[in-house]
Amino acid sequence: MAKYLEKKVDILDLADELCDGLVRNGKKTMITRQHDSLVIKRRELVRIQQPDGTVKEKLSGNRFFWNSQVPTEKQLARAREKGRKMPKTKTGGVVDLYMELKEVSFPQAVKDLWEQYGDENLTPVSYDNLTVRDGTKLNAKDRHRSLYEQLTKQKFQNHSMDAVIHYLSEVRGIDREIIDRQIDHKCLYQSVDKFGQPMATFVARDKDGYISGVSIRGTNPGKKFMMDYPNCNYDVGWHYDPQFDPSCRYDKTQKHCDPGKKLLCFESSIEMMSYMSILKSEHKDWTRFAYLSCGSTTKYGCIEETCTEYGYKDVLVMFNNDKEKDGKAAGRDYANLVKEQLTEKGIRCEVLLPRSANDWNDTLVGLRNGTIKLQYADVKKNKTKPVCGKER
C-alpha cells in the first residue's frame, strides 16, 4: 500500500493541502508557506543512456527535503545498510511527509492516506504530462566543458574586476590581499548577468584541475542574488589552500596542498574569505590553514570527500550560527552531524560557530565597525588559534 501511494500520489498536492499552500522556489522545487526550509521536489521523468546505447526511463522527484533538520538515525542506518551515500537532510516521500507534518506513526499514515488516495479515489498519473530531463551523469571532462560554456556566456574574466573588488572589500569588508590572492589563483572572476550587471563568480576545481563548480553572487548590495550553475559537483566543494595555485592541479609533478594543515570548512566562499580576513586583521598567518566552502550546510558531504581525497586528518567545521523561522539551528545541527561522522572515520573534528553574529561575514563587519569585540576560542593543538567563535 505504501509503495502504491509513493508512486501514485503527487507530493505537491499533499504538501499544498497540509501546509496551507506552496511558494515557488526554483524550476523544480516549491517551499511551503508554513515552513520555508521544507523544500518539495516535483515529479519528473528521467531518461538515462545505458552503456549499450539504449535509454532507460525512470520516475524521479516526488520527495521532500527539510533543510533545517538533520537526517534521522533510521535514515542514516538505512543508507549504511544499502551502501548508499549518507542523506544530507531529513528527507522522504509521500508517507514520510505525512508522518512528519501530522506526527503520526507509519501504519497510521498509510491508513489515512489510503482512505483519501486509495485505489478508488486516485486518478492515475499521466506520464505524458511530466517534465522529461536527461539523467546521464557527467564525467569530470564533460562537467568542465559544461561549466566553462556557461562561464563564457556570462563573459567571465579576471582582468577588470572593479565591481567585484568594490563589493567584496567595501561592502563585505574582506581584505584586499585575500581578494587578490583568489583572483591570481583563478578562484574568483567577474561575470555579467543577462542585464549586464556584474557578478562575483567563485570557481572550484577538482584534484585534476577541471572546473567542478561555479557559484555566483550579485554585487548590488540592495538586491540579494546568489545561485550555483547547473551541473556542479557538490562532492568536491570549493577547496582552497592559499599556498598552492588550484588552477595548476593538472600538473602532477607539483604539490597542490598540504594535508598536514587544519581544514576549515564554511557554508560559502564569502564566509571563508571573511574568516581569512579576521585572521589577517589579528596578525595571524591565514595561509597556515586549508579551506573548504561547501556551498550550503546541506552539501556537507564534500568535507569527508575532501579529507579522503587529500588526506586531511584535522577539521574545524565553521558553519553559520543563524536560526530558521521554525526555530531550528541548521548550521549547528549539521556541524555536529559532520563531527560525529568524521570522528567515526578517525578524523579529528571540532565545531566553531560565530559567537556574536549569525555568520562570519557579519562577524568581520562587526569587528571592523566596533560593534563586536574580539574573542579567542581555545582550540587544542592549533598554534594559530581561530578567533571570534564558540566551540561546541
Image: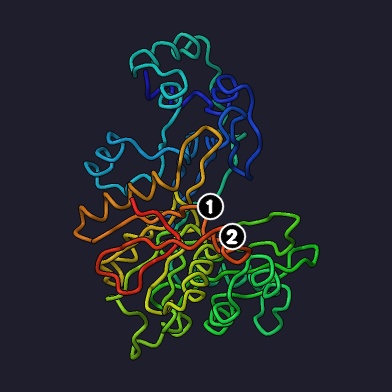
For residue 357, which numbered disc appears in the image? 1
- Circle 1 packing at 10 Å, graded few (<14), some (14-19), many (20+), is some
Give the amino acid type for the residue marked by disc 1 in the picture. Ala
Residue 148 percent across, percent down from the top left:
58, 72
User: Gap in Å between the C-alphas at discs 1 and 2?
Assistant: 8 Å
Residue 366 tag number:
2
How many numbered marks appear?
Answer: 2
Judged left or right of residue 308, residue 244 is right
Residue 387 lies in quadrant: bottom left
Q: Label 2's element?
A: helix
Place of residue 206 in the rendered image (x, y in percent of width and height, measured from the top left): 42, 72
Q: Quadrant of the N terminus?
A: top left
Q: Amino acid at mark 2?
A: Gly
Residue at screen point 48% across, 57% down: 267
| Residue 179 vs residue 59, the one in the foreground | 179
Location of residue 301 by image quarter: bottom left
Mark 1 vs 2: CB contact within 8 A: yes
Relative vertical location of residue 292 with respect to residue 27 in this rendering, above or below:
below
